Every structure is written in structure tokens, then in C-alpha cells.
Image (cartoon, rainbow, N blue to C red):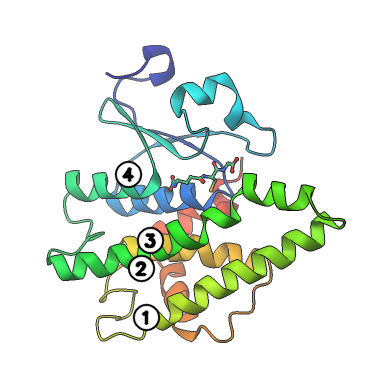
Amino acid sequence: MRFGEAEAGVANETVLYDYWRSSASYRVRIALNLSGEAYRSVPVDLLAKAHRAPEHLARNPQGLVPVLDIDGERLTQSLAIIEYLAETRDGTGFLPAHPIDRQRVRALSYAVAMDIHPVCNLGVVAHVMAGADDGEAARREWMQKFIGEGLAAFERMLDHPATGAFCHGDRPTMADLCLVPQVYNARRWDVDLSACPRVVAIDSRCAAIDAFQRAHPDRARP
Ligand SMILES: N[C@@H](CCC(=O)N[C@@H](CS)C(=O)NCC(=O)O)C(=O)O
């Protein structure tokens, strides 16, 4: 056990510290559901700055969600968590077997998680708003620009023979776990997705899957 028993609750219980609207948390909720991993959610209210409180900084020195307690360990970074599940749980399919397929799934995942998501994070956008005359308008414009441009590039990446019913082949991989929360955010900020038909179609297919439905922010809202 790498962390306090008091925090751990029931020994070896899987606990996700998350926020309902956090897309990095949403990725992990989908991954846990698809893995069949039972877990308890502990909300960390980003709007109330609970992620900056000592209690959460003790869980994650970066002051970010998600944090996952699993197998007696405490994990951070959503993609590293998804890869851990892929390596320790049977048959997730989050990462394909062949290195070149895995490379493509990671490239698609990183296009969302490392290129679109960080510039649209709460702390970054709050800084943008603070420097603008009309903070709300500046946020909207910022989100539409960076999510719109990022998903347009993702759409072009999907123009590839390995794209199937999902981002890579015919079952969800880590790339879909990244894409769906990003599309949720795109809709939240009224990003025009009319030039992204593959993205929209894959998102619809994922929306029909129970594990994705149970992870949706509307279901995760405390
Ligand atoms: N690379 C991290 C990103 C985590 C992250 O940025 N989480 C956001 C919510 S989606 C957060 O905690 N934001 C708080 C802030 O920006 O202050 C991961 O994938 O887990």
C-alpha cells in the first residue's frame, strides 16, 4: 500500500478521484467501465478549487484530476492509467498487439490529450479570461479555435486505412477513450463539427455502448 489507509477506505478498493466535467477523468471512467473494473468515485470539485487543497495535492502533486487508487497503488495521468489497465486487465483492447498499430493509437490519443486538451484546461483558460475585457467571449473564442482546429486535424488523421468503425479498427481503443470526451467538450462550446464526419460517426458509435454511457458527465455529476 503506497498511501494512507485512511484515504484508501476499504483495502484494495478501486477509487477514482474525479470531476464530472473533466475530460481526463471521463477517459478513465470509460476505461474502467470497459475493463469491468468496479470503482467508487470521489468528486474533486474543480470549480471550488478542491484540486488545489492540501488533501488533493497529497494525492497528486500536480493538483490535477484524475487520480486512481487501484491494486494498492496510487496512479495519476489518464493515459498512463489507461495503459496500466491495458497491461493488467485481460482483453481490454485499448492498445493493439502490433507495434505499428499501437503507435497509431498512441498518436491519435496524444493528438487529443497532449495537443488539444492542455491548452483548453481550466487553469490555462482562466488565465486567458483574466487578461480579456470580455472573459466569457474570450473563453468561447479560445475553445472554438483550439478544439475546432484540433479536431479538424484529428479528422484528417482518421483518413487512414486502419480506421474502422472506431478510430483504429472495429473496437474501441485508447484513441476513442480520448476522442469522446473531447467531442463532449466541443459540443459544450458549440464547436462546428460539420467538417468532421468521421469524428461524429465514431462518437455516435461509442455513445451506443453501455460503458461509454455510464461514464458520461451527466451520469457522473454528483
Ligand atoms: N495530463 C493529465 C491532465 C489532467 C488534467 O489536466 N486534468 C484537468 C481536468 S480535465 C484538471 O485537473 N484541471 C485543473 C486545472 O487546470 O487547474 C491527465 O491526462 O491526467
**Residue assigned mark 4:** 81
Q: Is residue 133 left or right of residue 161?
A: right
Q: How many marks?
A: 4
Q: Percent from the top left, x then y, of residue 143? A: 65, 64
Residue pictured at 60% horizontal, 28% vertical: 52
Q: Amino acid at mark 3?
A: Tyr
Nearest to N terminus: mark 2 or mark 1: 2
Q: Please report contact status of discs 2 and 3: CB closer than 8 Å, yes or no.
A: yes
SS at mark 2 in the image: helix
- What's the CA distance linking mark 4 and mark 3? 14 Å
Nearest to N terminus: mark 4 or mark 3: 4
Residue 92: image quadrant is bottom left
Label drawn at residue 18:
none
Q: Is residue 83 left or right of residue 8?
A: left
Nearest to N terminus: mark 2 or mark 4: 4
For label 4, being within 8 Å of ligand 1 is answered yes
Q: Amino acid at mark 4?
A: Ile
Q: Please report contact status of discs 2 and 1: CB closer than 8 Å, yes or no.
A: yes
Label drawn at residue 158:
1
Q: Is residue 145 above or below residue 210?
A: below
- What's the CA distance linking mark 2 and mark 1? 9 Å
- What's the CA distance linking mark 3 and mark 1? 14 Å
